[in-house]
């Protein structure tokens, strides 16, 4: 899994949580089912995407015919079972380590990114379906290290014109990652441009993807950077940023929040995951560490009338006996259901310290957390973003299963 910048504090937490304990907080009355266990591929960590027929698509970062990862499809059969097929096995030259999830366009093509491969810095790829049921992969862009960045680990989003946007978590001009755009050309090729390169003081290492608001502005998080007095004096403790689209086509960056700005980092630090936005334009996300217990938070940034943003902590993890409600929501981002409840995963905590799937419901007395599933050895350390369908079913994956290859799961309410 992607554990490239573990802090000394984080390592200490892992040592503490390695001690067995008894679960004192019961999970919700929901059904957990394993849909597919991998044996030909490893590390399914990207968010799943569903087509109109209810089939699931995803990536594994490793394994497959060449060992560089695959794109797979899970077909939902009439009897309720699921059948897995490999749509593409990466070769290294066309990409390697596709950690991120994918997105569909209106024609049913899939788009995604790889952490490495190509010339070594990763690629943006497209998978087009063929009439016979096969798929054809093409490389839309190959990253070039310190020109436009490398390690694009968060996937892509479309704008209304069909342009793609994403982040590189390292490299580019200053070495701290960048936001990029890919625009389609009439001849079928794509041209890439860097919209913004981070400088550390305004953010560093954007591991997560982006979200648009109604005006076409972009929002995201950086794992590090921001306030250099936050305790991590070398890199900073992370930011939430905005890229405002100007009339002349340029983009202006501003920092909406610098984490660890409160005493003892009560507002959280290290927001590895991305953001989601509600109908009012408020932003929601998670931090891996910090909060009242030091084991991570769910936070909200509320958009004020004067244009400023106010951060509040909706939930502190590890706030119940034995961390039964979860701890350290690492890479995954939150998702909404139709009723406005939030869903996510934590890598640690739960009955045996192996992580949980949780739900946060907005009540009159604040946000209430419910544990939908706690992993107890068969499946460990979920760190991907969940998918919630229209019926309220929750889908996700864990990178480590009983055979150390991971599996895809479903939770029904």
Image: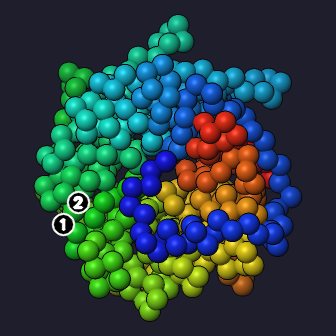
Determine which quarter of the picture holds residue 197.
Answer: bottom left
Q: Mark 2 — residue?
A: 176
Q: In this view, does 172 lie to the left or right of 213?
A: left
Q: What element carries label 2?
A: loop
In front here: 102 or 89?
89
Q: Do the residues labelled 2 and 1 touch (CB within 8 Å)?
A: yes
- In the displayed orientation, state which residue is furthest to the bottom: 263
Q: Is residue 43 left or right of residue 259?
A: right
Q: What element carries label 1?
A: loop
Q: Position of residue 320 (x, y in %)?
A: 73, 78
Q: Position of residue 19 (x, y in %)?
A: 69, 68
Q: Mark 1 — residue?
A: 199
* Residue 263 visible in image: yes
Q: Position of residue 368 (x, y in %)?
A: 71, 75
* Residue 406 visible in image: no
Residue drawn at x 64%, y 24% as measured from the top left: 84
Residue neighbourhood size for the residue with mark 2, other residues' Cα within 10 Å, grouped as few (<14), some (14–19), many (≥20): many
Residue drawn at x 83%, y 54% as measured from the top left: 30
Residue drawn at x 37%, y 65% as measured from the top left: 223
């Amino acid at each position: 899994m992607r554990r490239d910048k573990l802090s000394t504090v984080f390592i200490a937490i892992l040592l503490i949580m390695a001690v067995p304990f008894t679960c004192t907080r019961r999970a919700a009355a929901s059904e957990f089912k394993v849909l597919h266990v991998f044996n030909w591929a490893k590390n399914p960590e990207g968010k799943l995407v569903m087509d109109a027929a209810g089939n699931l698509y995803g990536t594994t970062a490793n394994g497959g015919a060449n060992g560089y990862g695959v794109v797979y499809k899970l077909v939902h059969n009439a009897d309720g079972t699921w059948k897995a097929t490999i749509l593409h096995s990466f070769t290294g030259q066309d990409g390697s380590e596709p950690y991120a999830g994918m997105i569909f366009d209106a024609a049913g093509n899939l788009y995604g990114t790889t952490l490495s491969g190509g010339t070594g810095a990763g690629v943006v790829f497209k998978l087009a379906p063929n009439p016979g049921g096969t798929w054809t992969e093409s490389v839309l862009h190959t990253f070039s290290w310190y020109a436009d960045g490398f390690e694009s680990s968060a996937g892509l989003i479309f704008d209304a014109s069909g342009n793609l946007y994403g982040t590189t978590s390292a490299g580019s001009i200053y070495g701290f990652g960048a936001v990029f755009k890919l625009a389609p050309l009439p001849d079928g090729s794509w041209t890439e441009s860097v919209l913004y390169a981070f400088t550390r003081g305004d953010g560093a290492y954007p591991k997560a993807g982006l979200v648009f608001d109604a005006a076409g502005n972009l929002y995201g998080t950086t794992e590090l950077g921001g306030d250099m007095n936050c305790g991590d004096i070398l890199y900073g403790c992370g930011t939430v940023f905005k890229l405002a689209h100007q009339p002349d086509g340029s983009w202006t960056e501003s920092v909406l929040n610098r984490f660890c700005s409160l005493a003892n980092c009560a507002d959280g630090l290290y927001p590895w995951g991305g953001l989601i936005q509600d109908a009012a334009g408020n932003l929601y996300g998670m931090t891996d560490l910090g909060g009242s217990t030091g084991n991570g938070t769910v936070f909200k940034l509320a958009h004020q009338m004067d244009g400023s943003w106010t951060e509040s902590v909706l939930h502190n993890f590890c706030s119940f006996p034995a961390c039964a409600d979860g701890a350290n929501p690492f890479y995954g981002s939150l998702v909404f259901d139709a009723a406005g409840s939030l869903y996510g995963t934590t890598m640690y905590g739960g009955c045996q310290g192996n992580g949980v799937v949780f739900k946060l419901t907005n009540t009159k007395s604040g946000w209430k957390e419910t544990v939908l599933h706690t992993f107890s050895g068969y499946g460990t350390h979920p760190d991907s973003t969940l998918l919630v369908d229209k019926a309220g079913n929750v889908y996700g994956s864990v990178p480590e299963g009983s055979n150390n290859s991971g599996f895809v799961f479903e939770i029904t309410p």
